Amino acid sequence: MLAATKKKTVAFHTLGCKLNFSETSTLSRQLEADGFEKREFTDVADVYVINTCSVTDNADKECRQLVRRIQRKAPESLVVITGCYAQLKPKEIADIPGVDLVLGAAEKFNITKHIAELSKGDSTRISSCDIEAVSGFNSSWSQGDRTRTFLKVQDGCDYSCSFCTIPMARGKSRSDNVANVVANAEKLAAEGVKEIVLTGVNLGDFGKGPDGNLKYEENFFDLVKALDKVEGISRYRISSIEPNLLTDEIIDYVAQSRAFMPHFHIPLQSGSDTILGMMRRRYKRQLYADRVTRIKQLMPHCAIGVDVIVGFPGETDAHFKETFDFLHSLDVSYLHVFTYSERDNTKALEIADVVPVSVRNDRNKTLRNLSYMKQQYFTEQHKGQTRTVLFEGHEKGGMMEGYTDNYIRIQTPFRAEWANQLVDWTI
């Protein structure tokens, strides 16, 4: 057991998405409340916690490298692995030399209890269960490390996209209720937070109870309206929302909202209806185009980000050209381009005509170039306009940065009095 005489120290490392960052931050506060002292991951600590991701291609490699680094630096320290990869492949992680504890989705928020029962040198413990058994919702938010706070309001997913492991890693769709989210937003406002980014696995599916049933008679639109009334929060962003769940009423409301920013991030994944069908997406490209058109009619200045996957099995040159031409025609601001990579236990593995990795990489490069041009064009359109920028407090090379309401990045020489402040800025 860890010595009870001195204060135990803990360090964290997060791989993956905004949701993971919000959960790591919550685990950190939880352990600090239970008597731990937080350290930087580069420092020596009694316990190291690595929150893993299953979306990145090299989750296994990254995890092994981090554990090896800890082993060299602090061989007597406890190493705890949690997150999506830990839920999907607990035995694989337990076989990594130096790992002491693997916590699945149901157990990550019971981390203090599990650490208390650990001793270095014991055989690796796995505390995990079938994902079908995972229920309950844990509120989480990131804090203290950036101006924007990521607030988790939903978890899990009931969709069955053929390329995705998230439902297997995080379980069924479940969410907080509006009253709790509003209370958390009020708490964050009291602590000086100016901007909240709403996060979840499938945000637009908000409204299912903590056990995944349709318990609440409220939905994502109800949440948006309620949060808009919270005093002290100047800005909200919706981290990502499926096009089939982004309703006209949400778009119309954001267009005249007090605090919801003119900024949407909407996954597309492919501009080919054939590939969308093989991906088991719940819309066709026309619906996506209609959403973009409505947003731009109401908010010509609105930033729209797009997720797209290249190299999905069966994606021919013609399908890719459809995607490129479709994206080229859309009035969107930037792309997040992902290269398809095989995932165990997904339906996509059954699809023939695997795209060579070199072709996948070429297509990725082509779309990243398109994204760069889109971003440049979007910024160019706003030159000379005055928009509000929320500056972050970090100083890097004598500079600071912030984002306009419509997500244009601004850099300027550091001024301490502008940190976490809204400043009118001519682009």
Image (cartoon, grey):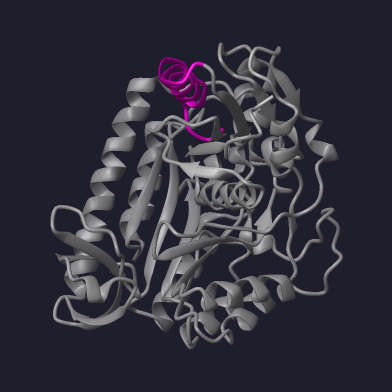
Q: Main secondary structure of the magenta part?
A: helix
Between 11 and 35, the residue placed more toward the observer is 35
**Residue 73 on the magenta span:** yes
Name the side, left or right, on which 81 lies relative to 322: right
Where residue 122 appears, x then y in whole percent? 70, 13
Q: Nearer the viewer, residue 214 or 2?
A: 2
Asked if residue 23 shows in the view, the reply is: yes
Q: Position of residue 100 (x, y in %)?
A: 64, 20
Q: What stretch of residues is rendered in magenta?
A: 53-75
Vertical placement of residue 121 versus 284, above or below: above
**What residue sits 45% from the left and 22% below the top?**
70
Judging depth in this view, the residue of 111 and 238 nearest the camera is 111
* Residue 89 seen in the current view: no
- Quadrant hosting residue 390: bottom left
Q: Is residue 264 above or below residue 94?
A: below
Residue 7 horizontal/vertical position (percent): 57, 40
254 drawn magenta: no
Q: Is 299 placed above or below 269 here? A: below
The image shows a total of numbered marks equal to 0
Q: Position of residue 220 (x, y in %)?
A: 67, 71
Q: Quadrant of residue 349?
A: top right
Decide: is 89 above or below 136: above
